């Protein structure tokens, strides 16, 4: 494994020159890279294998009583937040 951290933050302006190297690193190390812009917005790049693992974990959780309970709680809070928003 490389000595550089698997969870990195990069400025979007430097991304183009390093893009293929970053993609290879993500696939190999299954890390995450946060890409930011000057406005403070960001996105996260992850490997397809990591995305698949996360989706599988969410599916397993969703099929448990506790997972369904959490989903109902999140839905309830989302409705409350939507109702509290000014029209």
Image (spheres, rainbow, N blue to C red):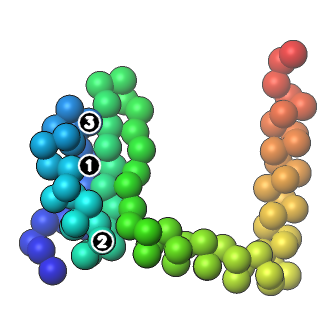
What secondary structure is marked by label 2? helix
Depicted 8 relative to depicted 12: above or below = below
**Residue found 53% across the figure and 74% down from its top:** 52
Distance of mark 2 from mark 1, alpha carbons? Answer: 17 Å
Q: Quadrant of residue 29?
A: bottom left
Quadrant position of the C terminus in the picture: top right
**Residue found 9% across the figure and 72% down from its top:** 3
**Residue found 40% across the figure and 39% down from its top:** 42
Distance of mark 2 from mark 3, alpha carbons? Answer: 20 Å
Could you tell me residue 81's position as x and y percent? 81, 36
**Residue identifier under label 1:** 9
Q: Are marks 3 and 1 in contact (CB under 8 Å)?
A: no
The answer to whether any part of residue 7 appears in the image is: no
> Badge 2 local density, few (<14 within 10 Å), some, or many (20+)?
some
**Residue identifier under label 3:** 12
The answer to whether any part of residue 85 appears in the image is: yes
Closer to us: 66 or 36: 36
Residue 27 numbered mark, or none: 2
What secondary structure is marked by label 1? strand
Circle nearer the viewer, 2 or 3:
2
Circle nearer the viewer, 2 or 1:
2
**Residue found 31% across the figure and 31% down from its top:** 37
Lower sequence index among marks 2 and 1: 1
What secondary structure is marked by label 3? helix
Q: Quadrant of residue 72?
A: bottom right
Could you tell me residue 56's position as x and y percent? 61, 79
Residue 45 numbered mark, or none: none
Depicted 76 relative to depicted 15: above or below = below
Lower sequence index among marks 2 and 3: 3
């Amino acid at each position: 494994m490389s000595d550089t951290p698997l969870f990195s933050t990069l400025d979007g302006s430097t991304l183009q020159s390093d893009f293929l190297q970053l993609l290879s690193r993500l696939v190999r190390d299954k890390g995450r890279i946060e890409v930011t812009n000057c406005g403070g917005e960001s996105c996260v790049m992850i490997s397809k294998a990591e995305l698949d693992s996360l989706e599988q974990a969410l599916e397993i959780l969703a099929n448990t009583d506790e997972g369904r309970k959490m989903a109902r709680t999140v839905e309830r809070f989302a409705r409350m937040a939507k109702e509290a928003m000014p029209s």
